Image: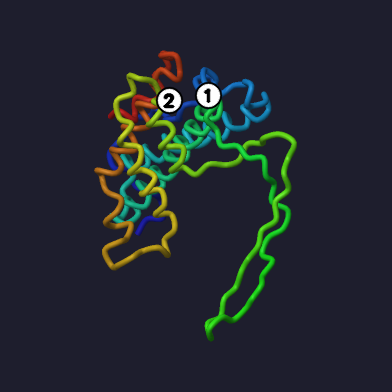
Amino acid sequence: MTNTLTLEQNTDDKTWYPNSINQLEEHLLCLISKNSYFTKAKAKGIRKNTSYSLQYIEFLYRVINDIKMSSVIHKQNMKSFLIHGTAVIEAIANFVVISQGHGKTTIWKSITKNHSNEYTLNSVNYKNEVEIFEKLESKVSTSMTFDTLIKKVESKKLFGSSFPIYSKIKPLRQLRNKIHIHDSENSGDTDWYNFNKKEYELIKEVLFEILRSDLFNNNEFEGFKFLNE
């Protein structure tokens, strides 16, 4: 028995290394930078976290293709690839939606919650819960769910009129939610059945199209070729 990982196939003496964070940040800078809605510091934070995830995704791609592993671990790696890939899509979608003036706002700030009032009516017990809000002087941004972001991106064509696969983003949200492993509805609702080559190819396709879309001004960066292999 060996205690070291076994490569799927023989390799030469060359050392593989993923796209550097600097390269990834430079590509993302075409889109994720300071504007009327994001400060320089906030844009930089989003850009860096997105770059970290993209580098990890490329590492997972190499693991999936180069390392011998059990079929279960193989599918768990594909699940991780999809979850981190979807996080990248969500970050880009959130930045685009807000930057183009379609973000969700509110003039109400929650002050206190769960003021309960229990009572009985016709022998049935009821409870009212009250949340108190303070009205603000001006609107502030509030977070949006991934589902809301997807709908805004698709309905307003925020990834560009030439982006070919808006309809393929929604299934990724449903798969991303499988991170909650306690939500299995039956014996067939498991990672073994939910994460296969079809789902793996789907996230690769959507990521590739977004990262090479008009959002990034037709950037010539070639570092995402692995997503199209």
Q: SS for tag 2?
A: loop
Residue 173 placement (x, y as % from top left)? 39, 45
Q: Which residue is mark 2?
A: 158
Whether residues under marks 2 and 1 lie with C-beta atoms below 8 angstroms apart, the answer is yes
Q: Which residue is mark 1?
A: 100
Residue 122 placement (x, y as % from top left)? 53, 83
Q: Quadrant of the N terminus?
A: bottom left
Q: CA distance from mark 2 to mark 1?
A: 8 Å
The residue type indicated by label 1 comes to Gln
Residue 42 placement (x, y as % from top left)? 65, 30
Residue at (35, 20) in percent of width and height: 161
Left or right of 65? Residue 81 is right
Left or right of 5? Residue 201 is left
Report the label total.
2
Left or right of 59? Residue 21 is right
Residue at (34, 24) in percent of width and height: 225
Q: Quadrant of residue 132?
A: bottom right
Residue at (27, 39) in percent of width and height: 9
Q: Nearer the viewer, residue 29 or 19?
A: 29
Q: Quadrant of residue 33?
A: top right
Q: Is residue 67 above or below residue 71?
A: above
Q: Quadrant of residue 7?
A: top left
Residue 108 placement (x, y as % from top left)? 67, 44
Numbered label attached to residue 126? none
Q: Is residue 29 above or below residue 104?
A: above
Q: Residues within 10 Å of mark 1 (few under 14, many from 20)?
A: few
- N-terminal-most mark, 2 or 1: 1
Toward the bottom, the furthest residue is 123
Residue at (34, 23) in percent of width and height: 163
